[in-house]
């Protein structure tokens, strides 16, 4: 067995220092990748939603989407659009796109319905009723393929996560399941959640993928912070994820490979 001289031991130190620096670089990049993957969970244009003000904005793209597709969506239901619950409870229904568009945006204190309404221009449910209507439109239009999106996902299938406090029980619910709870609360049923909590979640869902108008008058879409933090695709989804995190993970892999090769080379070169 050969014994290393002090000179040989000193010569090995810079190599070990290089390995340590590479290892620290990998660790830092790994942490950055984890953060980036969560922050960039939805890329621009993945889905589209509109809020109740958008659907009620005369001549807007969103209202034109509603008007152009209302009959296709609700023909099987006699052209009736309904929210709330029929029995026991209350509901409001709209018989055409103009009446529905005229109801939005709804204003007033959020509450439950106190009676059945046909083609109302306002309701006792206030802003809550308008958000429920907008959520149903977003889910129905998305499922029918009338709202653009590169992900190929139905908005109603997205899953809530990361909610805290009195809203934490809504984690793992889909957007469609939130709509079901909304309809119960709107109709006067006890859901176990306050209307204030349901209103907050519903409004955030509607605002998740709302386009904005750029300086050229074109719509551009960036997911909201709520979408990034609190919405995930269903399990097994093949929705495309954004490239930056993938690129960073690839860089980490390259650094890891370099370390292992360097380590192997050093071991092979060590005097025995």
Image: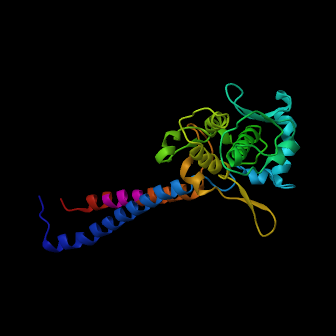
Q: In screen coordinates, is 23 left or right of 202?
A: left
Q: Quick one: quadrant of the C terminus?
A: bottom left
Residue depicted at x 42% and y 59%: 31
Query: Where in the figure is residue 114, as x and y percent of width and height?
Result: 70, 36
User: Where, by quadrant of the figure, is residue 246 drawn?
Assistant: bottom right
What is the count of numbered marks? 0
Query: Where in the figure is residue 196, as x and y percent of width and height?
Result: 58, 47
Residue depicted at x 58% and y 39%: 234
Our reading of the magenta stretch's main secondary structure is helix
Q: Magenta stretch containing residue 4, yes or no?
A: no
State whether residue 53 appears in this view. yes
State whether residue 153 appears in this view. no
User: Where, by quadrant of the figure, is residue 5 drawn?
Assistant: bottom left
> Residue 175 or 123: which is nearer the viewer?
123
Q: Which residues are magenta?
A: 256-263
Query: Where in the figure is residue 98, as x and y percent of width and height?
Result: 88, 44
Is 245 placed above or below 87 here? below
> Residue 89 or 197: which is nearer the viewer?
89
> Residue 64 or 33: which is nearer the viewer?
64
Q: Quick one: quadrant of the N terminus?
A: bottom left
Is 151 placed above or below 270 here? above
Residue depicted at x 64% and y 38%: 182
Q: In screen coordinates, is 117 left or right of 239?
A: right
């Amino acid at each position: 067995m050969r014994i290393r001289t002090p000179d040989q031991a000193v010569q090995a130190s810079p190599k070990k220092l290089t390995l340590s620096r590479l290892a620290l670089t990998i660790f830092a990049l790994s942490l950055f990748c984890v953060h980036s993957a969560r922050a960039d969970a939805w890329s621009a244009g993945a889905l589209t939603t509109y809020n109740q003000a958008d659907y009620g904005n005369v001549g807007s793209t969103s209202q034109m989407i509603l008007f152009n597709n209302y009959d296709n969506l609700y023909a099987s239901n006699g052209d009736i659009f309904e929210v709330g619950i029929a029995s026991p409870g209350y509901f409001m229904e709209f018989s055409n796109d103009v009446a529905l568009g005229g109801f939005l945006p709804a204003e007033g204190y959020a509450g439950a319905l106190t009676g059945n309404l046909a083609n109302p221009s306002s309701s006792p449910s206030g802003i809550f009723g308008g958000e429920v209507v907008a959520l149903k439109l977003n889910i129905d239009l998305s499922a029918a393929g009338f709202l653009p999106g590169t992900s190929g996902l139905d908005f109603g299938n997205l899953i809530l996560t990361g909610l805290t406090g009195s809203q934490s029980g809504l984690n793992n619910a889909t957007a469609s399941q939130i709509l079901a709870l909304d309809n119960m609360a709107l109709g006067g049923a006890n859901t176990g959640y306050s209307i204030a909590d349901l209103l907050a979640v519903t409004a955030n869902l509607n605002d998740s993928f709302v386009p904005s108008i750029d300086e050229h008058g074109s719509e551009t879409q960036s997911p909201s912070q709520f979408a990034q933090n609190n919405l995930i695709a269903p399990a097994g989804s093949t929705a495309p994820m954004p490239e930056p995190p993938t690129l960073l993970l690839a860089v980490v892999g390259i650094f890891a490979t370099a370390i292992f090769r360097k380590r192997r080379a050093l071991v092979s070169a060590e005097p025995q």
